[in-house]
Amino acid sequence: MSRALENIRVVDLSHVLAAPTCTMFLADLGAEVIHVEPLHGDDAREFGPFAGSGGKNNSGYFISLNRNKKSLALDLKQEKGRKILTDLIKISDVVVENFRPTTMRKLGFGWEELQRINPKVIYASISGFGQDSLPGYDARPSYDMVAQGYSGLMSITGPEGGPPCRVGSSVGDIFAGHQATIAIMAALMHREKTGRGQHFDGAMIDGLFTVLENAVVRYTISGEVPGPLGSAHPSIVPFQSFPTKDDSHLIIALGNDNLWKSFCKLIGREDLGDHPKFATNPLRTKHRKGLEQILIPEFKKKTRKEWLDLLGKAGLPHSPANNIKEICEDPHIAYRKMLVEVDQPRVGKMRIVGSPIRLSETPGEVYAPAPLLGEHSEQVLKDILGYTKAEIELLKTENVINREV
């Protein structure tokens, strides 16, 4: 089966999470992604959990993000290493990196240099504060936690009245990777029309600022400074989790007044549907606390399973508040192929997250395991760049590329 990006070559200078998320999607769609790693490997190879006997090639963290890619272990501090990278960029379509902006410039691979090397190349950079930033900000180090805090996201996350709280996954990195993927796709389309490459200057802060939803306009319109509300929505009520009889949690999401009235009928509380404090969503939002005190005892009357059956038959928006075990073993996740099995070298069979890009003809898919460190170094040099066996052996001796997998 043909793949959407099968003729696109990507030089992947990424590490850990933000840019690897982007290149993972490109690889899932069939791009040839060459992950250029330092000789000691991507930092993510040191992150657990570790499968099998452990070690750099057995990191579940790395494996889950680097399926379908090739690994070229290369010392970019050496002139010969930089020459190999330059030659590779000349015949590639996309370059992706997520170092501090000053790093690539110091190595001689900033946007200006890449334009000279390959005017058609699309260059995607992801950093904490962006390449084009206030003086000094381009050199600031950043991790997801920094981005979550700086962007304001942590201030609206967590229990009501609680301290700033980190979102449970590294959404600063992950959103940045998604947005870089969109930018690269748009730049590829633009190149089809103009023949010119572009530079995507992605900032984790920008990415998270765009996902604050209505928190920004709540401030810009009213001057209100939003705070955390636990599982509740700030402007739709009821739209949150409730504890049930068996101490499980159930999500209820009643996004309009008709759904609210149907729910009231379902629980035998038609009086609440037209109540002067609860008849409309603005009223329910205003009187959230009072409504919660009424609904909490109602949800405590039945188990989560009983509520799921009841709400399901009524066609009302709801969900169990699944833990990770529950969602990993969920039949719908299996049906959608969102948890797939790979045969990982030195590990064996293991399950990882599948691709969410379900195109009708060229879907994203997991078709190859994550590479061992430097597994494709010789292949890239020989088959793509035309190096001879003697030249490759010399590069190994000089520690320009890795000596062994």
Image (cartoon, rainbow, N blue to C red):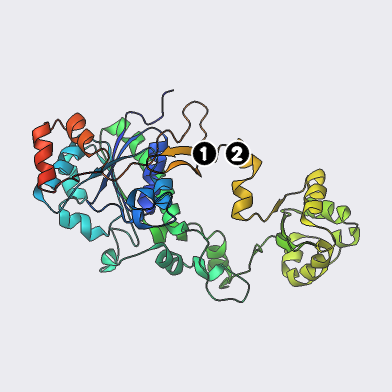
The answer for how far apart the CA atoms under marks 1 and 2 are is 8 Å
Q: Along the line of sight, which residue is nearer the eye, 147 or 299?
A: 299
Question: In the rendered view of the protein, which quadrant contains the N terminus?
Answer: top left
The correct choice, above or below, for 250 with respect to 338 in the image is below
Label 2 Cα neighbours within 10 Å, binned few <14 / some 14-19 / many ≥20 = some
Label 1 Cα neighbours within 10 Å, binned few <14 / some 14-19 / many ≥20 = some
Residue 310's disc is none
Residue 163: horizontal and vertical position, in percent? 55, 76
Which residue in the structure is indicated by mark 1? 340
> In the shown orientation, is residue 339 left or right of residue 71?
right
Snapshot quadrant of residue 225: bottom right
Residue 64: horizontal and vertical position, in percent? 43, 46
Q: Residue flagged by tag 1: what amino acid is it?
A: Val
Q: Along the line of sight, which residue is nearer the eye, 197 or 16?
A: 16
> In the shown orientation, is residue 180 left or right of residue 321?
left
> In the shown orientation, is residue 46 left or right of residue 226?
left
Residue 98: horizontal and vertical position, in percent? 31, 54
Residue 167: horizontal and vertical position, in percent? 52, 63
Residue at (41, 53) in percent of width and height: 176
Residue 334's disc is 2
Snapshot quadrant of residue 330: top right
